[in-house]
Image (cartoon, rainbow, N blue to C red):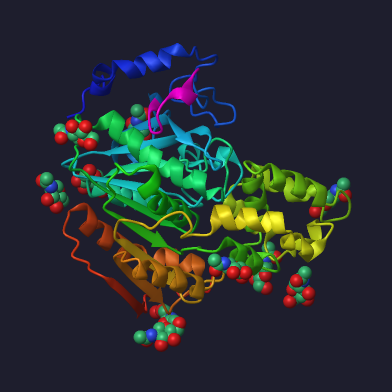
Amino acid sequence: MISLIHPLLFLLPSLTEAASLQPIPRQAPPGIPIPPRQDPWYTAPPDWEYRQPGEVLRIRRAPGNLTSAFNASETFNILYRSTDTNYRPAWAVTTLFIPKSGNHSALLSYQIPYNTPDVNASPSYAFYSTPSTQGLVYTDIVGALSRGWYVNVPDHEGPLASFLCLVQEGHATLDSIRAVKNQFQGWQLSNNTKIALWGYSGGSIASEWAAELQVQYAPELKIDGAALGGLAPNFTAALANVYNGSYFAALIPAALYGLASQHPFVKQYLASELKTTGPYNATTFNSILNLDILSAFNFFANQTMTNYFRSGVEFFSNPTYLDIVARDTNMGTHGVPQMPLFVYKAIQDEITVIADSDAIVERYCTDRVIILYERNTVGGHLAEETNGDARAFEWLAQVLSGTLEQRGCTVRNVSLNVTDSLL
Ligand SMILES: *[C@@H]1O[C@H](CO)[C@@H](O)[C@H](O)[C@H]1NC(C)=O
Ligand SMILES: *[C@@H]1O[C@H](CO)[C@@H](O)[C@H](O)[C@H]1NC(C)=O
Ligand SMILES: *[C@@H]1O[C@H](CO)[C@@H](O)[C@H](O)[C@H]1NC(C)=O
Ligand SMILES: *[C@@H]1O[C@H](CO)[C@@H](O)[C@H](O)[C@H]1NC(C)=O
Ligand SMILES: *[C@@H]1O[C@H](CO)[C@@H](O)[C@H](O)[C@H]1NC(C)=O
Ligand SMILES: *[C@@H]1O[C@H](CO)[C@@H](O)[C@H](O)[C@H]1NC(C)=O
Ligand SMILES: *[C@@H]1O[C@H](CO)[C@@H](O)[C@H](O)[C@H]1NC(C)=O
Ligand SMILES: *[C@@H]1O[C@H](CO)[C@@H](O)[C@H](O)[C@H]1NC(C)=O
Ligand SMILES: *[C@@H]1O[C@H](CO)[C@@H](O)[C@H](O)[C@H]1NC(C)=O
Ligand SMILES: *[C@@H]1O[C@H](CO)[C@@H](O)[C@H](O)[C@H]1NC(C)=O
């Protein structure tokens, strides 16, 4: 039974101290969630740079009423120290959902594909408004909690909503798990708690980067498995696939503003390239800064995004730009995952060709990563999120109960047809 006054508040005096160091200028009225850009809670206390990655800087019960909608007993927001894409101190926020019952044996870190440079679309706040637009994500979280798993959902793009700054997204994901362990170890979670990563599409890139960065950045952290759906191993190729006449054209402004948030060159290059007049102008392009990704897909659908740039399609050939995209988005360049992987992808994926996923899986297999890779003959990128979902759950349940008996590398075609939509 969870008492009214949370044991946390007694067990962790350092926390309340940390929180009291910083006078919060405007306290949210109880129960009212405020968007991150306006909410003073989303700031780090003084001297946060000197804390260790994963150290908790602030914690609160998540405002509003998330517990009933998610079948959780409690929900917390945790603000923690992390490391940005240029390896400088950073911080991020995660939401931890505590199941109504369970034996504290399983923690799922679930990375949501929010894919936007709008910080107000970060999951910790979007939970209050978008169940209708990202339905499956919510079903997954409820499903995990109903199985008795703890569920950690980081705002992995960080406080600048740095979509595609994947070193930072990987760090923020790993540090969110460290923060949860730092906070709950010994009380709710133990050293034996199994930990798994899960993400689809924009969630898979954060999850995969966490998996590949773990060995260098968080060597003490034992992660027991990672389920990666709709993998996008090469964003240079992905952006070339979606810039002209695609439903996913919004990924262009999302990627560029995400990268610009931490790469000064991209910021300056983009500003110099955007046209200021005509129908394809900076004002329209900048709409991305205030859109969640599904609204953005509908807003930019089918456009030729190079129309916004003075140099047209040449925009994508700038060598400095290409170097940054390769360095911060190409998978398999920063380490080799040390945990078993379940990779699932539609053969007809329109954002990133299946060959790119085949290639990274083959490389990791050579590096002796334990992998089950399922290539679905049915459906496209969005359909696979649904088609692969039950298989991912099944695999994660094995990882989190310690019963996974996977060895070596298995690559197979499957035909899973919950929906055969080509999107
Ligand atoms: C939260 O919402 C549910 C219905 O969605 C309601 O039954 C419950 O009383 C609410 N709890 C609080 C604390 O407002
Ligand atoms: C809610 O989660 C608990 C486990 O935490 C589970 O026993 C229960 O069946 C779930 N309720 C629903 C309605 O899914
Ligand atoms: C749990 O792991 C930490 C870090 O490895 C270690 O310091 C601690 O002693 C362990 N706790 C128990 C109860 O084994
Ligand atoms: C990524 O895709 C681009 C564009 O298709 C290609 O030039 C590049 O070689 C690819 N990178 C890797 C590591 O495969
Ligand atoms: C975009 O696609 C259309 C239709 O296929 C084609 O005519 C046009 O040349 C393409 N534009 C660019 C910039 O690639
Ligand atoms: C920018 O483009 C939009 C349509 O995308 C148009 O309505 C607006 O007038 C344009 N603004 C300028 C300054 O040309
Ligand atoms: C984009 O193109 C597709 C296929 O031609 C069409 O079905 C859809 O309605 C278009 N969407 C928009 C927003 O124009
Ligand atoms: C916790 O519960 C899961 C699922 O019910 C079970 O597989 C696992 O063995 C249990 N672990 C412990 C330590 O009791
Ligand atoms: C799997 O699908 C690919 C097409 O992507 C095909 O070339 C290959 O032969 C299939 N493999 C098997 C074992 O059916
Ligand atoms: C998927 O299932 C639907 C409905 O059962 C069926 O109409 C369709 O042909 C199937 N698609 C594929 C590719 O098997």
Q: Quadrant of the C terminus?
A: bottom right
**What kind of secondary structure does the magenta stretch mostly adopt?**
loop
Determine whether, in the image, residue 3 is placed left or right of residue 350: left
Q: Position of residue 386 (x, y in %)?
A: 41, 64
Q: Examine the image and state in which quarter residue 12 appears.
A: top left
Q: Does residue 67 show up? A: no
Q: Residue at x 71, y 46 (%)?
A: 265
Between 370 and 230, which is closer to the camera in this rendering? 370
Residue at the image position 67 percent from the left and 51 percent from the top: 256
Image quarter of the N terminus: top left
Q: Is residue 174 visible?
A: yes
Residue 347 among those drawn in magenta: no
Residue found 29% across the figure and 41% down from its top = 220
Residue at position x 41%, y 62% in the image? 229
* Residue 264 as seen in the image, left or right of residue 47: right
Q: Is residue 232 above or below residue 119?
A: below
Bounds of the magenta segment: 46-56
**On screen, residue 248 above or below 118:** below
